[in-house]
Amino acid sequence: MGQDARPNWDNPLQFILACVSYAVGLGNVWRFPYLCQMHGGGGFLIPYFIMLILEGIPLFYMELAIGQKMSLGSIGAWTAISPYLGGVGLASVVTSLYLCLYYNVINAWSFWYLFHSFQSVLPWSVCPMNSNRTGPIEECEIATPTQYFFYRETLNISPSIEEHGGVSTGQAMCLVLAWLLTYLFIVRGVKSTGKVVYFTSIFPYMVLFIYLIRGITLHGAMNGVKYMFTPNLEQLLNPTTWINAATQIFFSLGLGFGTLIAFASYNHYNNNFERQAIIVSLINCGTSIFASIVTFAIYGFKATVNYENCLERTRLLLLNTFELAEDSMSFDQVFDWIEKLNATYPMQFAEIANQLEPCNLESELDTAVEGTGLAFIVYSEAIKNMPLPQLWSVLYFFMLLLLGMGSMLGNITAIITPLRDFKVLSHLSDELLNGLVCVFCMLLGLGFTTTSGNYWFTIFNDYGANFSLLFIVLIEVIAVSYIYGIKRFEKDIEDMIGHRPNWYWKIMWAGVSPVVLITLFVVYIVNYIRGGTPTYQAWNKELGKSVVTDYPVFGQVFIGLLMVSSVSCVPLTALYVFCRKRKRANHPKRRAVSTAST
Amino acid sequence: MEDVVFLLLCVSSAAAQLCAPDASNGYKVRLSILAALGDEAYLWNDSEMFLFRAALAFAMRTADGQNYDVSNVLVCDETPRVSFWFVVTSPLNPTQLVERRQVEEAVRKSRNRINSAFLLTDKTLEFLGIPPTLAAPAPPSPPPWLIVFGVVMGAAGAGIVLVLVTSVMQKRRKKKEEQTGIDEVEEESRAEENGTASDGVYNLSFSDNDRLTQM
C-alpha cells in the first residue's frame, strides 16, 4: 500500500462554499461599512468595483490556479514554481500563523457576548451598582454601559500596554472553547471542513437577511441608509479613497495567506476554477454591500435613538428649570423653545447653558467606527434598544461567530496543508498534527486574554499581516508572470480547464496588478515612515474614553519584528537554497559515484 | 369676627413664612405625570394635592408615631410643571418645623406607598435631595453565561471525543483488513510458486498446429 492519495472535496460546491466562508468574514461587516462612510457613501462603490476588476479577481484566479495545478500547500507549490521562491510560501505560513493566533480571540469575544445574551436584562444595557449601593459604578457612568461592559467586564483592560496583569478567566475559557470548536471542524482535514462550510457559509446570510428586515423597519433606519448611500463624488478625487478600496479588496478576498492555494490543492485536476473564482469574488463583494446596508440601517436607528434621547434630556432640563407644564413642549419643539427662552429669560438661561447638550443627528451619524468597536460596542448599543433584545443579540453574535469561524477554518488550513506536505510530518496522523497546531496556537493566544492583551491584539491586527501580504502577493504575481512565465502558466491552465485564459487575465497578471500592488506597497511604506511614532488607543478609566498613546520602545521594536519576520522568509529561503545548490555543485565527484551505483 | 379673620391671616402668614422655596427644612417635589402615564394621565388639581399631603402625613405617622394630620403638611410655590415645595410642622407645635433628616427618613421608609398612591415611580415622583434607595443586587447564583458555556463546551468536547474514537476504530478496522489482505496475497503467491505445472498459461507457439500447416 503506497502513500494515501490526497483527499479531495466531496463536490465542487464544497470548494466554493469553503472559499466563500473564508472570504466572507468579519471585515465585510465591520470594515467595509466604515470605508463607505469615510469615502463618500455610495460613491465608494466605484473605486471598489474598479479595484475588484483590476486586482481582486485576477489575483484570486491566479492563486486558485497555482493551488490546483501543484496540488500542494503554499510552500510546496512555490518551491515547484521555482526552488528559490519557497520562501514566499513560508512567508504565507508565518503570516497565517500570526493571524490564527489573534483571530480566534475575536471568536472568544463573540462567544462571551453570545453567552451573556441569555439573560432577561442584557448586561451591557445597565450599569452595575457600586459596592456602596449608592449609585452606578463611576467608570460606567462616565462612559456608556456598552463601553464599560466591553472594556471592563469583557477585557478587564489595563490603562496601557506597559502594565501587565493576569489572564482573564472568562476570556481564557471562551478562547479554549473557540479552539476546541476549530479543532472539531478541521480534525479530519477537508473531509470535516467540507461538511462544516455548508453551515458556516449559508447561515450568516440567513441572519443578515433577517437583520435586514428588522433593520429597515426600525425607527430612524432610513436616516442611516440615506446617509450612507448619498454619494459624495468629491471623495473620488482623494487618492486615499482608491488606496483604501484596493487594500480592502485585497484583504477581503484573503489573498496571500496561502489559504486559497491550500483549498484549491484539494480540487480535482480538471475542476473549472475560472468560473468559481469569479463567482466567489462577486459573492464576497455583494456580501460587503449587503452587510453595509444592514449596518447602516442599524446605525441610523442608533443615531436616531441617541438624538431623540438627547432632545428628551434637553426638554426635561428646560421644563424643570423654567417650571413649564409637561405638555407645553413636545420634543420636536425643543429648538424653538430654546430660542424663545433665551430671549425672554437670558439670566436663567445662562445658568443652564453649560448643561445643554448639542443634539445633532448628523454628528451622531458621523461617528464612524470600525473594527471591534463597531461590532461589540456600537452594535450592542443598538441591539439593547430594540424590542426583544435578547433574540437579536443571540442572532447577531451567532452570526459573528459563524463568520469568524468560517475564516478561521481557512486560516488554519493554510498552515496545516503545507506542513502536511513535509515528509518529516507526513507520518503523523491528521488528527494528531491538527491537534498539535491548535494546542500551540491556543497556548500562545492566551497571551491576548491578559489585561494588556487587547493592546497586543491591536498590534497584531494592524501590523501583523498588512505589510507582509502586500509584499507576498507582489512577489507572487511577478513570479508567475515573469519567472514562471505567462506562456507556461497559460498552458497549465489549458491543461486543467481546457481553454486558455483570455487577454483580460493576461494583461492584469503581467501589467496592471503588479503596478497597482507596487503603488500600494510604496504608499504603505511612505505612510508608515511619515506617520511618525505609531500610536494606539488606550482606555482611560478616569475619563471613560480611549486616549491616543504612543507605543513604548519595546512595542515599536515588536511591530518592526512582526513586519520583518514574515517578509524576510523570502530572501532568507532563496539564500539558503542558493547556498545548498552551490554546495552540491562543489562536490561533483560524489554525484558521479552515486549515479554509477544505481 | 375680626378676631377670626385676624387669626386666619396670622395663621396663613405664619404658614407662608414657614413654607417658602429654598426653605431650610423643606423639600422640593416634582411630578412628571405625563411622562409616566401618557394617555392615562390624570389632571393635577387640589384633590390630588390633598392626597399628597395626606400621603406625606401618613409617612410621618409611620416613621414618627406622632399623630400627624393633613394640616401639618404645608405646601407652597406650585408651578405648572407640577412642582412645589413642602414643609412639615410638628403636631404638638404648629409653628415648629420638623427636622429635614426626619422628613427624609419618613419619605424614604414609605416611598413605595407614596409612589403607588400616585401611580408613579421613583423617577417620575422626585423628591429633590432624597435620592431613591437602589434595589438590592441579585443573589450570586451561578451566572447564566456559565451554564450556556458549559453546555456548548460539553457538546464540543463530546463531538471531538466521538470523532477521535471513530477514527481510531476506523484505523483498526483498516489494519485488520490490510492484514487479511496481505495474508491472501501471500497465499496466492505461494500457490503460484508451486502450481506452475498445472496452472500455467497456454502457450500457443508450442501447440500442435500440424493440421493447419500441412500442405
Image: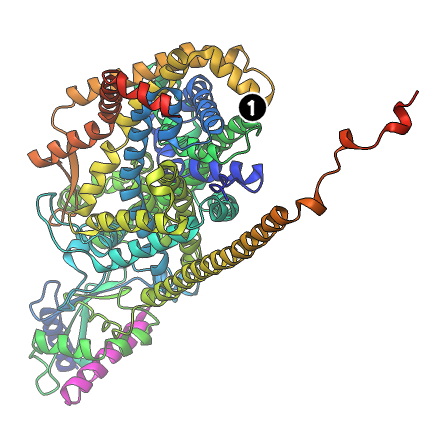
Visible residue check, residue B62: yes
Q: Which of A223 and A184 is in front in this view?
A: A184
Answer left or right for A538 relative to A222: left
Tell me the kind of residue under disc 1.
Answer: Met
Q: Which residue is drawn at 54% across and 52% down?
A: B182
Residue A239, by quadrant, is top left
Visible residue check, residue A311: no
Q: Is mark 1 on a helix, strand or loop?
A: helix
Q: Which chain carries label 1?
A: A
Q: Residues within 10 Å of mark 1 (few under 14, many from 20)?
A: some
Q: Quadrant of the N terminus of chain B?
A: bottom left
Q: Residue at x 32, y 66 (%)?
A: B146
Answer left or right for A385 relative to B75: right
Q: Which residue is drawn at 53% across and 36% down?
A: A16
Q: Which contiguous range is marked in magenta?
A: B45-70
Magenta: main secondary structure equals helix
Which residue is the site of mark 1?
Answer: A496
